[in-house]
Image (spheres, rainbow, N blue to C red):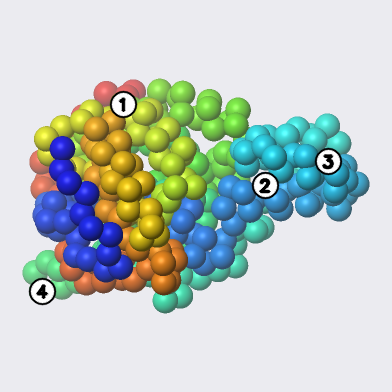
């Protein structure tokens, strides 16, 4: 078991991440913490919006909302959708996830790294900028978004410009999952489990935007992907802590490493809170070079797709 590194505000990416970029094996796994830096709503924020919409329509009052807020956000959303359905009202939460641009934000840094991405976010601000230099010419990779679970294939992540929206995407509202029932059914789906299993087995993963608040989602993803703890360091997670939380950080570092083979990279939140994460990813974007994986991996992809028919 490795020792937890000291909490710092800025540090270099691990050698394994640098090498994975060069080998075409690096995948960024992006969570709500990234979108919240652009003031897009979290699960809790979406639940608040949903309950507010129902109150405006007279389907809930403030007392009922206050009681519902004692529940976790997914339960709040599940109940909100049930109430809306009973009253033949369509909850449109997608409108709260649009209207932003990457700007000079963590999203720009993620896109500048340029590797394929998987995200549990609905917004479409992730658009990896991969430029292939070949024969003296440069070609930018086209962005390919996948949000339908029957199209989830891990080998698609061999292609730069690929973004897999694990919980659905704003451009395809029918793919977006909000409620607890949808969430559980989604992760019980064979295609989702196979996709995650292949991803964790064959790629080096960096989780970004999964703080303590997102721990439940992160652990669920790891469990459904049936991760195995190996000697190879292939899974990393940037996570923020206050200096006073050093003991918590060390305990969680041991827990994630022993349980899931995930190595926590802790940064200090005391001065810039989660904006510190943005600074780290921006610095890493200048240090990580991403290349296409070897052509042999394309044959693996063809075998995977043909085997699914």
Q: Nearer the viewer, mark 1 or mark 3?
A: 3
Relative horizontal placement of residue 222, taking residue 181 as reference (left or right): left
Residue 162 vs 88, above or below: the answer is below
Residue 104 horizontal/vertical position (percent): 42, 76
Q: CA distance from mark 1 to mark 4?
A: 43 Å
Q: Earlier in the sequence, mark 1 or mark 2?
A: 2
Viewer-nearest of discs 3 and 2:
3
> Residue at 65% of width from left, 58% of height from top?
96
Q: Residue at x 38, y 28 (%)?
A: 224
Residue position for label 2: 47
Residue matched to label 1: 226
Residue at 46% from the left image edge and 37% from the top image edge: 216
| N-terminal-most mark, 2 or 4 | 2
Identified at 23% across, 28% down, the residue is 228
| Residue 127 in view | no
**Residue 136: which numbered mark, if any?**
4
> Any mark on residue 64, and which?
3
C-alpha separation, residue under disc 1 versus residue under disc 2: 30 Å
The percent coordinates of residue 108 (x first, y second) are: 38, 70
């Amino acid at each position: 078991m490795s020792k937890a590194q000291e909490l710092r505000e800025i540090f270099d990416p691990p050698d394994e991440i640098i090498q994975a970029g060069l080998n075409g094996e690096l995948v960024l796994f992006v969570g709500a913490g990234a979108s919240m830096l652009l003031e897009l709503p979290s699960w809790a924020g979406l639940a608040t919006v949903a309950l507010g919409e129902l109150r405006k329509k007279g389907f809930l009052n403030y007392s009922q909302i206050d009681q519902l807020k004692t529940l976790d956000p997914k339960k709040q959303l599940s109940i909100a959708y049930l109430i809306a359905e009973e009253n033949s009202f369509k909850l449109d939460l997608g409108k709260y996830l649009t209207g932003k641009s990457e700007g000079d934000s963590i999203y720009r840094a993620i896109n500048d790294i340029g590797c394929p991405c998987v995200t549990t976010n609905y917004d479409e601000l992730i658009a990896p900028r991969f430029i292939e230099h070949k024969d003296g010419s440069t070609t930018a990779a086209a962005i390919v978004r996948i949000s339908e679970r029957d199209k989830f294939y891990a080998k698609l992540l061999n292609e730069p410009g690929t973004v897999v929206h694990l919980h659905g995407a704003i451009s395809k509202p029918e793919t977006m999952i909000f409620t607890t029932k949808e969430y559980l059914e989604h992760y019980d789906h064979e295609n989702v489990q196979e996709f995650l299993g292949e991803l964790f087995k064959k790629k080096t993963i960096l989780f970004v935007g999964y703080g303590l608040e997102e721990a439940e989602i992160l652990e669920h993803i790891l469990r459904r992907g049936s991760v195995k703890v190996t000697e190879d360091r292939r899974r990393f997670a940037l996570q923020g802590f206050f200096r006073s939380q050093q003991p918590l950080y060390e305990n969680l570092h041991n827990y994630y490493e022993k349980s899931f083979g995930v190595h926590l990279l802790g940064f200090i939140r005391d001065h810039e809170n989660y904006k510190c994460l943005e600074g780290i990813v921006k610095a890493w974007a200048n240090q990580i070079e991403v290349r296409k994986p070897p052509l042999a991996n394309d044959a693996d992809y063809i075998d995977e797709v043909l085997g699914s028919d």
